[in-house]
Every structure is written in C-alpha cells, then in structure tokens.
Amino acid sequence: MKLSEFDFFLPEELIATRPAKPRSAARLLVARPDATQDMRVSDLPSLLRRGDRLVLNDTKVIPARITGQRRRSGPEGETSARIEVTLLEPQADGTWSALIKPLKKIRDGENIQFKDGFEATLERREGGQGFVRFNVTGDDFDNALNEVGAMPLPPYIAAKRAADEADKEDYQTVWARNLGAVAAPTASLHFDEALLAELKMRGVSLSFVTLHVGAGTFLPVKVDDITHHKMHSEWGAVSAEAADEINKTRQEGGRIIPVGTTALRLIESAAHDGALRPWSGDTDIFIKPGFKFQIADGLMTNFHLPKSTLMMLVSAVMGVGRIREIYAHAIAEKYRFFSYGDASLLLPASFENEPAP
C-alpha cells in the first residue's frame, strides 16, 4: 500500500492545544461499519455491556524535557550555552539516551547544570542522540526531575505553546503508575474518576498493561511503500494477572476494547494462537491493513496525524475506506485532533456479532 492512501487535509484550527475539562466531556465519535454517531466520552458506559473489558496502559510520563547550562572556561574566559535535553530511554549502563539541542554546543565529558546541584554529563553520542549520566539516581533522580522537568509535549503542541504546570496533570492518566514514558497514552487522558466509577457500576471490567510510549511514536513515515517502513520499538509488559483476566473475559463472551493504540499494539504483540500470554520485552509490531487481530474486538483512540503509522493502525481496525469516511466526518463536525483532542470508538463488524454474556 502507498503512503498517500493515509493522507488527509486537517485544518490547523482543529489541532487541540488544551484538553477538555472535565476530561470525560470530550467528544466521542462512535463508528460502526455502516453508522456514525456523535457522542461524549461520558456516554461510554452506555455503549458497552456488562462483561466487557477495557484494557488500559498504566505507563507514567516523566517530565522529560529539562533545560540547563553548559559552562566552559577557555582563553576567552567563562562561557555558557543554553542546552535543552529531552530524555528518551534509560540504558542498561545507567545512562539515558536523549535529544540534545544544540548538540554541537557541548563536548563529550562536559556537564549540563540544571538546578540545585542537579546535573548530567554527556558521555557519548550516537546517531544524532546524546547519552547522559545524571549525578543522582533512584528517588533523588525522580524528585529532581519532577522539580525541574517539563512534560514533553508533542511537536504539534510544542510549536504552538510551551509546556506549563497544568500539563503535569493534564498529560498524565489518572491511573499512571509505572514511570518510563516520554509520551502519554492519549486516549486514556479522557478518563476521570467519575467515568471509571460509572463503568464499574455498569459491570465493565478493567485490566492494566504497561507500554512505555517513546518519542518514536512521532517519527514520520519516509517511504512511499509502507511495507518498507521500519517500526520503532517500545518496551511493554503484560502480567499473568492481566492475561488471565482478558482470556477469561473472552471465554465468557465479553468483548476486549483496548483504550489507545499502545494498549492495542501490546496485547496483539503478546497474543499467541488466539489467547493472551504473559509477556515482556520490546515490541516493534506494525499494525496495518490486512492485520489479523487475535485479542482486540474494537478500539478507543484519539484522532491521528496524516500519513502516520497510527492512521495505518486504525485503518486495519475499520478498513481504509471506512476510516476515510470517519475522518471526513470528524473534520466536517470540527472534532479536535491529536493528543489533547477528542476521541473515537471504533467498532468493527465482529464487535456486534459476538454473543452477549
């Protein structure tokens, strides 16, 4: 398939820069094979049945963007340069891979000083990334990062405004607990405690899995033939408890609805012979049209960038032609797009065909 098949024109004003308040007040486009409804996220409990199960990503976003100073003494005296560090992934040797701007302004072995004695040393560089080692670890590192770091907002938001204190709450799910993501599982940002309570009252169950969303989620597809695209990898884990819960729900006739493309990619990575198994490791699964789903019966997700791997994923769920119709409707009705935008509930034909529990 060609990359152009996943392109569309999005008016600039539909890119959301702040979330809906309250979270569940966001709009929800409900799409079935032959029907489209305009609803609210708060309507989600009425769209599911007792015995259905939502799968949620419990990764926690770190305030990964930190700004400091590189100071250097030389023949011209004391000089300094402002350095922005965006953390990407912890390494086995104790360093962090990071995007450093401007990388040319700092030499290997030099320090970047942030605040109150918190600093990092650039140890090496590879493939346009720097690898830095911080002078504190464990809880001290977490506390220092929370003090000086900013949420790493996606490029399409960062281009419009800087991150602020509100983003430390807005760009985090209410159930976040496993630190490690540098991007939020954004479909989950629509859930608040009131919505979770309503789902529980309706008999809809929840299972938690972990996929640490990386900066690779924003990388563009650069090949015209999408079968040649090399997918980025991200670390994830499905516990034995979550696998058992999901398998039991399927055996009892309930439907499995991952919330977000990250949860979907993870459970399909851990699927084997139509069942979910406990699993952990790096996944580079590339879900595109023609993919055979083993676990997921539908998907709740936000609206995605043109020509992105996530557009290919939602096209695999609903079909390329149907997704074009869904996105045309969303644009015509002025839904808000991307990370802080509105949501969709994609329900393919198999969703309605399964028997009620």
Image: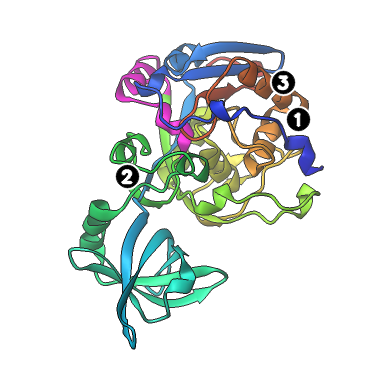
Q: Nearer the viewer, residue 119 or 35?
A: 119
Give the percent coordinates (x, y) of residue 139.
22, 59
| Residue that numbered label 1 is attached to | 320
Circle 2: element type: loop
Circle 1: element type: helix
How packed mark 3 is, by other alpha carbons closer than 10 Å (few <14, some 14-19, many 20 or more), is: few
Camera-near label (2 vs 3) is 3
Rendered view: 33 above or below 170: above
Secondary structure mostly seen in the magenta stretch: helix
Q: Nearer the viewer, residue 69 or 327?
A: 69
> Mark 2–mark 3 contact, CB under 8 Å?
no
Circle 3: element type: helix
Disc on res. 236: none
> Mark 1–mark 2 contact, CB under 8 Å?
no
Q: Residue at x 65, y 33 (%)?
A: 314
| Residue that numbered label 3 is attached to | 325
